[in-house]
Image (cartoon, rainbow, N blue to C red):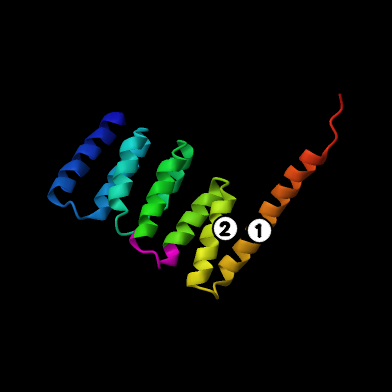
Amino acid sequence: MLKEIEEEIKEFGELIKKYPDIIELYIGRALLYTKIKQYENAIKDYEKGCATYMCYDIMNVCKRNNLVKEAEELYTKKINKDKNNTINYMSRARFYMSVGENEKALSDCETILKLSPKNNFFLEIKEALNKKLKLKQNKTEGIKKRPVFR
């Protein structure tokens, strides 16, 4: 099985040399790299393949392998290429929520709502995140107020 996957990776590499602009080749090779746990190579290929769109699989690869910083950088790079594209902010907000970075997700929701004020879905997401953050804050404050027994 390993030998077959490595052979397929070589085939993708040959095709990429011939056709470097075909995004699906990079994504296909990245998926093969994940099968043999070569996650750094998978990230590099996803980054190349995601030049024109963000591939949602990268989020799962990064989460499984604790590559949160790398995934965040990819999402941010995508946003920086087109700061008015709400899809890019939605992708990163979804990513932030999946890794528990609710403050950052809320910030992206606010940006989405500036770009698209009538987006009911993200109005609801913003409300849910605000509730979650308020609960977290209340729990933290409750812990601080507890008396210390000695």
Which of the 4 image quarters holds residue 122?
Answer: bottom right
**Badge 1 amino acid:** Asn
Task: Judge from the rendering whether residue 97 lies leftward or rightward of residue 73; answer left or right.
Answer: right
Location of the N terminus by quadrant is top left
Residue 113: image location, x then y, percent? 53, 69
Residue 2: image location, x then y, percent? 30, 30
Q: Residues within 10 Å of mark 2 (few under 14, many from 20)?
A: many
Most extreme residue toward the top, as rendered?
Answer: 150
Asked if 131 appears above or below 29 in the picture, the reply is below
Q: Residue at x 34, y 36 (%)?
A: 40
Check disc 1 and report its element: helix, strand or loop.
helix
Q: Residues within 10 Å of mark 1 (few under 14, many from 20)?
A: some
Location of the C terminus by quadrant is top right
CA separation in Å, label 2 and label 1: 8 Å
Q: Residue at x 87, y 27 (%)?
A: 149
In the image, which disc is placed on residue 130? Answer: 1
Residue 130: image location, x then y, percent? 66, 58
Residue 79: image location, x then y, percent? 39, 59
- Could one spot residue 58 in this view of the protein? no
* Of pointers 2 and 1, the one earlier in the residue sequence: 2
Q: Which residue is mark 2?
A: 106
**Badge 2 amino acid:** Leu
Which of the 4 image quarters holds residue 45?
Answer: top left
Q: Residue at x 51, y 55 (%)?
A: 94
- Could one spot residue 89 in this view of the protein? yes
Q: Residue at x 54, y 45 (%)?
A: 99
Asked if 79 appears above or below 142 in the picture, the reply is below
Q: Which residues are magenta?
A: 81-87
In the image, which disc is placed on residue 113? Answer: none
Circle 2/circle 1 CB separation < 8 Å: yes
78, 38: nearer the viewer: 78
